[in-house]
Image (spheres, rainbow, N blue to C red):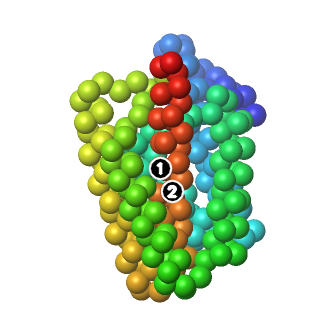
Amino acid sequence: MIKLMSSKVACFLCKDEERKDNYELYEYAVYIILSSVFHIATIIVLGLCFNLLVESLVLYFSYIAIRKFAGGYHAKTPARCYLCSLLISIIILSAIKLFCCTNIYILTLLIVIEILCVILISRIAPLDSDNNPLNSKEKKYYRKVSRVISTALLCISIITIRLNYIKVGVSIMLGIFMSAGVLLARYVQNVINRY
């Protein structure tokens, strides 16, 4: 559906003779914009359904901030990507809704896991994909940025928990967990593909 809409918008934008050479570029740009809007709209709807709008947005943007620079596993089709993202978001929002508590031992355990995830991200990021190979200069830059973002989010999550905004802090943590999870999945996939 998004592909069809992207094609129609690109056709409209390329009506002029001088723009016809840019059709594929316009189609891709519109596709990326529409996909992003669709994902954000889904996150907003899920947040409203779970009565966790702020937490769902914090989770999504924490995850995307790291993923943009760290990379990670990619589903084979956009539909699979969307369905996996939807399922994971539902599971995580359910966990926030049902299990978010003020137990100091559980929060301490989550912080320890979060620190381990940040170390993992720092060690193996970035991982490029077949569609987006990175040169050595880009890898060095993306590694620095992913380390800074994941470390900053770690600090922000701890601060928000200390300020008693526990659900927001846990949402940031879970965004880091998701980023580390897709990064680790891509790393394992790369190892398997080598053999």
- Whole-percent x and y of residue 33? 56, 40
- Whole-percent x and y of residue 29? 53, 32
* Residue 131 visible in the picture: no
Residue drawn at x 39%, y 49% as measured from the top left: 120
In-image side of 17 versus 84 (left or right)? left
Q: Is residue 45 above or below residue 127?
A: below
The residue lying toward the viewer, choosing from 119 and 157, is 119
In-image side of 175 versus 87 (left or right)? left
Res 177 label: 2
Q: Is residue 37 above or below residue 115?
A: above
In-image side of 154 versus 187 (left or right)? left
How far, Cα to Cα, is label 2 from label 1? 5 Å
Res 180 label: 1
Give yes or no for contact between labels 2 and 1 (Cβ–Cβ under 8 Å): yes
Q: Residues within 10 Å of mark 2 (few under 14, many from 20)?
A: many
Residue drawn at x 48%, y 72% as measured from the top left: 109
- Total labels drawn: 2
Amino acid carrying mark 2 in the image: Phe
